[in-house]
Image: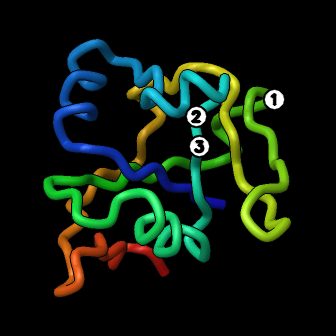
Amino acid sequence: MRIYKILPRRDWEQAWGAQVYEGSELDRADGFIHFSTAAQAQETARRHFHGQKDLVVLEIEADDLGADLRWEPSRGGDLFPHLYAALPASLVRGVADAPLDPDGTPLIGILP
């Protein structure tokens, strides 16, 4: 199963240079990196990234993350993937732009 991380392009560029993504400020405060499934990603974009520009979406194979990935209840009781470790850049399977729709919500159009 593929999972997704939405983040500013500059954060991904820094992570790529370091070959590791340590998470956003919110991720670090919560103690894990927040991910979304394909079904959850658009609502995550609307809630947390509305009006932000120059975003990218990382695509990761959940099984590659091993025991550090936990599925935990969050929004509305849905299980969300949370990574309790840094993300090695080598595990990112794809990176795509997240353009904005007319209301300012990032479009996560690469997802099934």
Give me the C-alpha separation between circle 2 and circle 3. 4 Å
Crowding at dot 3, Cα within 10 Å, few <14 / some 14-19 / many 20+, comes out as many
| Viewer-proximal residue among 15 and 106 | 106
Q: Is residue 28 above or below residue 107?
A: above
Q: Which residue is mark 1?
A: 67
> For the residues carrying marks 2 and 1, which lies nearer the camera in this image?
2
Q: Which residue is mark 2?
A: 33
Q: Quadrant of residue 18?
A: top left
For badge 3, the amino acid type reads: His
Q: Is residue 107 above or below residue 98?
A: below
Residue 15 is situated, as x and y percent measured from the top left of the image, at 30, 23
Residue at 52 percent across and 73 percent down: it is 43
Q: Quadrant of residue 84?
A: top right
| Viewer-proximal residue among 35 and 20 | 35
Q: Which secondary structure, mark 2?
A: strand
Q: Is residue 64 above or below residue 47?
A: above
Residue at 39 percent across and 52 percent down: it is 6
Q: Which residue is mark 3?
A: 34
Q: Earlier in the sequence, mark 2 or mark 1?
A: 2
> For the residues carrying marks 1 and 3, which lies nearer the camera in this image?
3
* Residue 14 relative to residue 19: left or right: left
Give me the C-alpha separation between circle 2 and circle 1. 14 Å
- Tell me if label 1 and label 3 are in contact, CB under 8 Å: no
Coloring scheme used: rainbow
Q: Which secondary structure, mark 3?
A: strand
Residue 10 is situated, as x and y percent measured from the top left of the image, at 17, 34
For badge 1, the amino acid type reads: Ala
Q: Quadrant of residue 28?
A: top right
- Tell me if label 2 and label 3 are in contact, CB under 8 Å: yes
